[in-house]
Amino acid sequence: MNKPLPVVVLISGRGSNLEAILDAIADDELPVEIRAVISNRPDAAGLQRPALLGIRTIVIDHACYPSRHAFEAVLQTTIDAFEPGLLVLAGFMRILTPEFVTHYNGRILNIHPSLLPEFPGLNTHQRALDAGKRESGATVHFVTPEMDGGPAILQTRVPVLANDDAGLLACRVLEQEHRILPMAIRWFAEGRLRLDDTGVVIFDNAPLKRPRILLPEAQEPT
Ligand code: GRF
């Protein structure tokens, strides 16, 4: 059997996407080893579960550094000590500089709660509602220097319902995030997914022209 892929996960808060990754590993569905979970916020609830599982948890509080570069220098040194084959941003709420992102080119994934390229950045759900969208969703993409702008790998869609507020919509989208993030990580770990030198996503040995779409469970063919 192949060795599991070493992974470092960055979080900032609740950590439910991290939990979805940990659940998939526990179910033997994800051939990865989480070597460390790093949070930029000391109070991140998402640090609790990995700590209970004996996974290294580290806080690097961005507020303690005089500049973004100073913070990232420590972050990068810390990450690299774990020699990850993949870095996963699972609700990591800091903008990363192009230098940092380039250092990990082709081996950083991010989950974003919209159908990118729509609504990059913050307040995604409210902006989707304000724009009168009938549909929203989530995207896993490779990270490039452009914020939430890297090539999309996998998306899933959810309806926007008449009585939605941002919280309700966020919950519906989050459930789907928990399906697509472990799936994309699995593809990467299995060698089915990579970013080539020209920035094109290669999936199963062919360029991925548009993201794969995962249907909501209810709509999947039986
Ligand atoms: C998720 O919606 C993620 O897409 C966004 O922030 C949220 C983090 O949730 N970037 P959690 O910490 O994984 O529960």
Image (tube, rainbow, N blue to C red):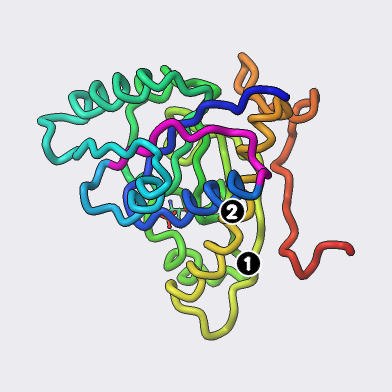
Q: Residue, x 47% and y 41% (percent of image)?
A: 148
Q: Quadrant of the N terminus?
A: top right
- Report the label total: 2
Whether label 1 lies within 8 Å of ligand 1 gets the answer no
Q: Does the magenta stretch include residue 57?
A: no
Instruction: Tell me the chief SS of the magenta region.
Output: strand
Q: In this view, does 216 lie to the left or right of 115?
A: right
SS at badge 2: loop
Q: Name the residue under label 2.
A: 115
Disc 2: CA contacts within 10 A as few (<14), some (14-19) or many (>=20):
many
Q: Residue, x 66% and y 61% (percent of image)?
A: 157
Whether label 2 lies within 8 Å of ligand 1 gets the answer no
Measuring from the top left, give residue 166's x and y in whole percent.
44, 72
Q: Mark 1 points at which residue?
A: 135
Residues rendered magenta in the picture: 28-39
Q: In this view, does 48 lie to the left or right of 198?
A: left
Q: Nearer the viewer, residue 110 or 197?
A: 110
User: Quick one: which residue is furthest to the top in this view?
Assistant: 197
Marking on residue 84: none
Among numbered discs 2 and 1, the one appearing first in the sequence: 2
Q: Nearer the viewer, residue 57 or 145?
A: 57
Disc 1: CA contacts within 10 A as few (<14), some (14-19) or many (>=20):
some
Compute the Cα span from label 2 to label 1. Answer: 9 Å
Residue 119 to residue 198: above or below: below
